[in-house]
Image (spheres, rainbow, N blue to C red):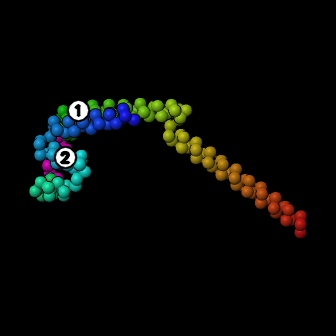
Amino acid sequence: MIQLIKNSEYSKNELWGIVERYTATRENGIIKEIFLHGKSMAQVAKEQGLSFDRVRQIKESGLRRLRMGRAKRELLEKFDIVEAGLYQGGLNNYREHGFTSIVERTAMKETEAEERYKQHLRGIEGRYRERVALSGRKS
């Protein structure tokens, strides 16, 4: 768990480092306020004395920079590392569950539940027939 937190902090620091390196100062500030601090564009606009539309334009400009050239390449490299980690975690989970996928496990559980339900219905029907047979003998 501690390793996961360390990796998470490292990833966040890497991400915000990339944002800082590839965006202008104003873009960086607005992107951090919105995505890191969870503020709305209206809050940021009010705090910085800008119009809502200007904040939107600056944010979009910064995000556009991150989608191009070196920034995009660096983000994709970091994403690939994360994706590999997810793959490894998925593979371990797959092994732990007898080499069945989530879909297969869900289908197997559903099939088992359906079989238990049918078995329960057969039991109820059997008891009902017994009662009908007993009541027929009494009459």
Please, what is the three-letter code of the amino acid marked with disc 2? Ile
Question: What secondary structure do most residues of the magenta stretch adopt?
Answer: helix
Q: Which one is in front, 9 or 27?
A: 9
Residue at which label 1 appears: 74
Question: Looking at the figure, which quarter contains the N terminus?
Answer: top left
Position of 3 compared to 109: left or right? Answer: left
**Residue at the spot 14% in from the left edge and 49% down from the top edge:** 58
Image depth: mark 1 or mark 2 in front:
2
**Residue at the spot 16% in from the left edge and 40% down from the top edge:** 65
Residue 63: x and y, percent?
19, 44
Along the polypeptide, which appears first: circle 1 or circle 2? 2
Residue 53 appearing in the image: no
Report the disc number at residue 122.
none
Residue 86: x and y, percent?
39, 34
Query: Pointer 1: residues within 10 angstroms few (<14), some, or many (20+)?
Result: some
Please, what is the three-letter code of the amino acid marked with disc 1? Glu
**Residue at the spot 89% in from the left edge and 69% down from the top edge:** 139
Q: Is residue 86 above or below residue 138?
A: above
Residue at which label 2 appears: 31
What stretch of residues is rendered in magenta?
56-65
Mark 2: secondary structure: helix
Mark 1: secondary structure: helix
Q: Is residue 46 above or below residue 64?
A: below
Q: CA distance from mark 1 to mark 2?
A: 18 Å
Residue 28: x and y, percent?
16, 43
Residue 130 appearing in the image: yes
Q: Is residue 78 above or below residue 27?
A: above
Query: Pointer 2: residues within 10 angstroms few (<14), some, or many (20+)?
Result: many
> Dots 1 and 2: beta carbons under 8 Å?
no
**Residue at the spot 44% in from the left edge and 34% down from the top edge:** 90
In the figure, residue 130 lies in which quadrant? bottom right
Position of 100 compared to 15: left or right? Answer: right
